Image (tube, grey):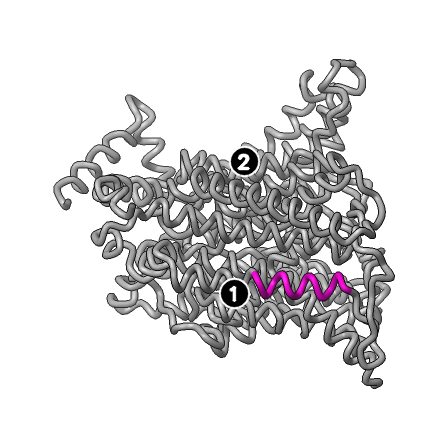
Amino acid sequence: MTIQDDAERRDLSSGDRMPGGLAPVRGFFEAHRSISVIVGMALVGLALPLVVMLPPFSTFQAGAAWMNNFTLAGVYILLALGLNIVVGLAGLLDLGYAAFFAIGSYTYAFGASPFSGLHIPFWPMLLIGALMAAIFGVLLGAPTLRLRGDYLAIVTLGFGEIVPIVFKNSDTYTRGTNGISSLYPPDLLGYRFSTIEILPFYIVMLLLVTLAMILIYRLQESRLGRSWMAIREDELAAASNGINTVTTKLLAFALGASTAGLAGVFSSAKLTFTGPDQFLFTVSFTVLAMVVLGGMGNIWGVALGAFILYMIQSVLLKGLNQFFDAVPVPILSDIDFVQYQFLLYGLALVSMMLLRPEGLFPSKRRRRELHTAAPGDDAAATPAQEAGGALQ
Amino acid sequence: MELSVLVQQFFNALTLGSIYALIALGYTMVYGIIELINFAHGDVFMVGAFTAFWLLTVPLALHGSVDNPVLLAGILLLIFTVVMVFMGIVGVVIERFAYRPLRNAPRLAPLLTAIGVSFILQNIIQVVFGSSPRRTPQIFGNDARFDLLGASISFRGVFIFLLALGLIFALQAFVGRTRLGRAMRSTAQDREAAQLMGVNINRTIAITFFIGSALAGAGGVVYGLHFGQIGFTIGFSAGLKAFTAAVLGGIGNTTGAALGGFFIGFVEVYSGQFGLFRWSEALVFAVLILVLVFRPSGLLGQPLTERA
């Protein structure tokens, strides 16, 4: 077994080596994660506005609409990065993740809207929203993280259902189904963000995503991050090696929640509105599909997965509808493509799990973990087939 | 509160509880045997409700009540048989393609495929039957009722309760007394040892899925008959409540699941009665969280620990 492991490790490491002159560059970026994130995000942030001015994209929709989509995609990237801490790094299935998004969003609505009469600036609200979400994460996690992993999935699913119900039913405090509107947009040194001018929001979003990615990279390689992965791979072994599994899982939960809180504050400040229908189970599910598709545990992969799925959901499917409305093709014109969104996610989840459980852009460790289990399974399945039929 | 209202609500709770109990049995059986929370189970229930709707409206072309009791009995027998067999097959197919290949994979993997299957089923129904709710024909006449202590009890409700009770006892007998039932229990207890004793594991698990999904299908038929209106999202909340019932009763324990189903029915109906209608769902989930926190093994279940 160990020999096989070693052989595989050698295979993997040799496979990762880039040919020729790129190796030192790659080595530098692997050694300096924060710099690589900053450089990468700066390039992406500059490239996106330029790319959409070019023909195939510019004919599709106006540049401002693209930028708006990118900014909102950023909200989902933040959510996916946060859920990745919980699901990808610590291996805990959180199905009510939208609840923390909702808490962050409503925190901003309470802190900066004519409805509550308060006007706390956007920047401290980012921290407050993240903190509130983290507090609720701890409150929910503390009693439930002692349970088996799959019970946690159900508890979080229940929590994800309760939170929007509470916001919806507490009319006096949240204006119920109407939601809270005309929230104050952010201010910076006298400059007031407006819903018409998208660029400032885009830049803030880029900064937030960059910051989140750097922090999560740092966390992942810290003692805490390694403990998360140890728990994910074998909780019993992790506990035997002196890891306090409850505290470690609780931290994953709280940090994941706080990222969602951050996303919530940004999203409600950008939309200047928050309402209970924005946080239904479908949001949790979409983010989960993004994490799984991108590759659980791989930060760049998850961000890319979120970006791609968001673009498919909000641009491609609608675009297909418009396209086939204009160009009559017998069957395709009648199909409402947006309706198939969740079929797409469902199929993606099932086929990813069956065919490529490590995701499209896997982390090295995760791939090893998922693929070394396979030979053992075959060995276990053989006696079953031999024993089959004996019951008759 | 008047006695008649309490009695009326008692029967309403029994009917609602019957539906939850039928769904909860499938959750508990599947969890008992392969330790998987089958998130798609609620949607199997939903597909069952739509299959019954289709059978009633398209091949049978029924739109109102059926007053001839013999004919009514015949139709019910036909619908329940067809829907249960069909849903059983759907359950087996889901297990074969979405769960069996992942039986030895990390725990997260089958949970994720289960969620994926759940969304696939919902979307298929949404596309086929549309997003707006559909009216299931009320084949029980609305005036088929009798009075009890001032409450007006429908024969439909009595039928639903008796049917659920019958299916629950039939399942108990099957699991407890037949050879296949013994195979199921042994597989649940220790899969490898059962295998060594000659139990065909794959077939036993497939049968478990067949029975669980068939019961959920029956629950779906009952739901349509009782509420008269179905939509493609009913599986989500009904499934979550039924799962609560299964956990409450002690997951893996069929008696517990049935009792839990009735308990949840009572919580929901009486919370509505006492003016908490908008909160009844939140209340059920609060029950779930409280049970999991304070007594995760449920009322009748065995204590469970993380699998080593």
Residue nearest the viewer, comparing B295 with A34: B295
Query: In the rendered image, which residue does mark 2 sit on?
Result: A347
Query: In the rendered image, which residue does mark 1 sit on?
Result: B169
Residue A387: image x %, image y %? 23, 44
Q: Magenta segment, principal secondary structure?
A: helix
Residue nearest the viewer, comparing B32 with A195: B32
Count every numbered label the image shows and give the total: 2
> Is A135 located above or below residue B170 in the figure?
below
- Decide: few, some or many residues near mark 2? Use Cα within 10 Å; few <14, some 14-19, many ≥20: some
Residue B289: image x %, image y %? 56, 71
Look at 73% across and 64% down and name the residue there: B157
Quarter where residue B144 is shown: bottom right
Residue B305: image x %, image y %? 35, 68
What label does residue A333 carry, if any?
Answer: none
Q: Amino acid at mark 2?
A: Leu
Whether residue A278 is visible here, answered yes or no, is yes
As measured in the structure, the alpha-carbon distance from the residue carrying label 1 to the one carrying label 2 is 37 Å
Look at 54% across and 43% down and name the residue there: B116
Whether residue A124 is visible here, answered yes or no, is no
Q: Amino acid at mark 1?
A: Phe
> Is A256 located above or below residue A324 in the figure?
below
Residues shaded magenta: B155-166
Quarter where residue A76 is shown: top right
* Chain of the residue under label 2: A
Q: Quadrant of the C terminus of chain A?
A: top left
